[in-house]
Structure formats: structure tokens, C-alpha cells
Image: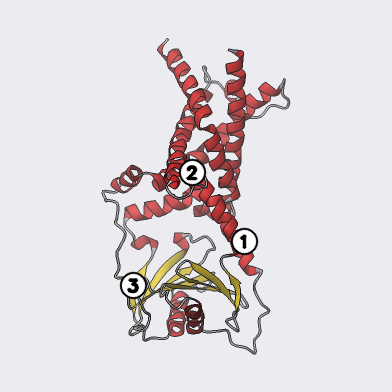
Amino acid sequence: MFLKSFKRWVFWTHLSLGLVAGIFVFFMSFSGVLLTYERQLKELSEMSYAVQPNVSIARITTDQAVAAVQRLKPDEPHIYVRWVNREGAAIPVWAGKNSYLLHPYTGEVLRHGEGSVTEFFHLVTDFHRYLSLVGEAKVIGKNITAYANLVFIFLLLSGLYLWLPKRFNWKLVKQNLLLPKGYRNHHHRNRQWHFVFGIWCLPVLLVISSTATIFHFSWANTALYGAFGESVPQREQHPEVTSLAADEVLYEDLFTKAKQHALDNGYQDWYSMWMEIGDSEHEARFYIDKSIGHRQELAYSLYFDTRNGDISKILRKEDWSSGGQAWGTARFLHTGEYFGFIGQTIAGVASLLACILVYTGIVLAWRRLIGK
């Protein structure tokens, strides 16, 4: 009797919360589908600016790339230069939040700003995180998506409980595990889609929704780091760098050393190498990445002292604390990028199925409530 009453309570709570938060879950899921191949599409947009390789002309040096962006933004010492390991590839550079794309042989600006593709993904990301609200209302959007995500976790777990048959045998399980060859009516189709798609994408959606909590709630980060006996690390504070004049070693020499270090450490097939200067005084950081998607297992940071060119620090994922490694893993599990292109595809398909779950759930709830 108790189990029957409890299951009834779970059902009506599942239905009610689904109706309340369903539209926001749909928004997050649909925007998640659009973000599935964000990195690949942004990379393709930059590849369209590649020029024909010219063996008779040397590419511009790292110092020339820095000088080019300094001419554009002379008051911004925080600079990124990204080298792609491909002949003729355009050179993305940043001065603070200002982005440019440089010609690899002349240093000419090929593109001002991040381009239409990246701007599109900025809009989708803002909608995914904040429902496109701006200013003070941005906090409201963030809270709505945060708590809608918590409701979604409950819907997934309660849905699993409701999915379990009263008597556990293969025939009953199969009915809710596989789609039938035909449907008696629309209601039967919606019910089967809700049950079958829900159970198949449940593990992936649980990973996506649970890892999303670390972006929204301090208690989630405290719990994650606390599981490894650590406290949440505080962001490092550096004295503001106002000028790069104190950098004495040529950046091109540092780039050459970084390429040699990559060669000596099994990263000869690096895809891109980012140089960051101006974040900390007398320091240049090179982020050497084998992947497009910043997968931490396939990348490491190399720090140089810009006064003498010596390596001051090497930071790989295994050098992080256990809690830091877990946070990094959770961050890339959320997008599926932890498993590369295949992981992204699985996450995208699961997000699409989540949209179908919202639709079928609302339709089923409407039919039941109207029927009552």
C-alpha cells in the first residue's frame, strides 16, 4: 500500500514539475544541440581564411604578430597568439577581448572580430546559460536555468523509478525498452517515445545535467573538491601588467623552444599552440594542444621567463590536484568533449532526445489533466 501511494506521489510530482520547468529544459536541450559541434564549426570558419602556402616567403614571426596586434590596440598588453600547425593557416590573435585574424605571410588583418560563426555561438551560449537576459536580469536567467537543471535531474531519476515495471520480467521490460513495430494511436506513440527514448538517453542526460551543477552552484563545487579532501581553490591574483617592455627574449625564440619541447615530449603532432603574454609580469605561457577541443589529457602548459628564456613551469593535467582534475573532467563531460568527436555526438543526440522527452511529456500530461 505504501509503495503504491509513494509511486502515485512520485508520478504527480514528476508531472507537475515537468510542466513547470519543461519549457526551460527544452530551451537548454535545444541550445545544447546547437552547441554540439561548436569548436569544429568555429575552426572551419577560420580555415576558410587560410591562404595558399608559399615556400618562397617566410611566415611572419611571433614578434611581428604581437607587434601587429599592438598597433591595433596599443593600450592592451594582455595578448594571445594562436599558431595552427598547418601551412598557410591564418593566425588568430587577441588583445584583451578584441580579436583579429592575420595573414600568415604579410600580417595583414584578414578579419576584425571573431566572425559571424563565433558570434552566433556566443548568442546561443548566452541563451543556454542566461536565456539571453542581460544586465541585472542576467542573474535571473542564470538562476532559472540553474534550478530548471536541478528539476531535470529529479525528472530523470523519478522517470527511471516510474519506468520500472511492477513485476520485473523480460516481457514487461522489453515493452518499455524497445519501440514497437506499430502504434495504436498518437497517445500510444507518445507514451512509447517517452519511455523508450527516456531510458536509453538517461545515463548521458544524467551526466550532462549533474556536471552542469558545477557551473551554477557553489555547493556543487564544494562537494566535488570535498570528495577529495580539498577546498575550492581561489582564483590567483596577479599584479596588473601595463607594458610588455620588460620582456627581453624574442617571442619567436620562445615559440621555437616550445616547439622543440613539444617534439621532445611526444607532442610533435600538436594541432595548435597558444602563446599568452601580459597576464603575469615576465611570463609567457604556451598552451600546446593536440586536439581542437582543449581536451586536457591531450594538452599541457609551458611557462617561460621572458627575461632569460628559461622554462619556469610545466603544467599537465596530472600536475593538478585530484579535485582540480575531477573538475576539469566534469567540465568536458558536460559537453561530451572528454571523449572527442564521438562524445560530442552522443551528447548532442541525447540533448535532441531530451527535447522529444519534453514534448511527449507535456502532451501526455495535457491528455491526463484534460481527461481528469
Cα separation, mark 3 vs mark 2, equals 34 Å
Name the residue rendered at 42%, 41% in the picture: 143
Cα separation, mark 1 vs mark 3, equals 31 Å
User: Which tag is nearer the camera, tag 1 or tag 3?
Assistant: 1
State the image coordinates of residue 208 (x, y, percent, origin top left): 49, 43
Report the residue that reaches farthest toward the front. 136
Q: Earlier in the sequence, mark 1 or mark 3?
A: 1
User: Would you name the residue on which mark 2 appears?
Assistant: 208
The residue under label 3 is which amino acid type?
Ser
State the image coordinates of residue 124 (x, y, percent, origin top left): 56, 50
Name the residue rendered at 63%, 29% in the picture: 193
Establish if 225 lies above or below 156.
below
Question: On the picture, is 77 further left or further right than 23?
Answer: left
Give SS at disc 2: helix
Name the residue rendered at 53%, 64% in the picture: 291
Image quadrant in which you'd find residue 363 = top right
Q: Residues within 10 Å of mark 2 (few under 14, many from 20)?
A: many
Give SS at disc 3: loop
Q: Residues within 10 Å of mark 3 (few under 14, many from 20)?
A: some
User: Would you name the residue on which mark 1 appears?
Assistant: 116
Residue 246 in view: yes
Mark 3 touches mark 2? (CB < 8 Å): no
The residue under label 1 is which amino acid type?
Ser
User: Which tag is nearer the camera, tag 2 or tag 1?
Assistant: 1
State the image coordinates of residue 277 (x, y, percent, origin top left): 40, 75
Quick one: quadrant of the N terminus? top left
State the image coordinates of residue 80 (x, y, percent, origin top left): 46, 72
Q: Earlier in the sequence, mark 3 or mark 2?
A: 2
Establish if 249 lies above or below 72.
below
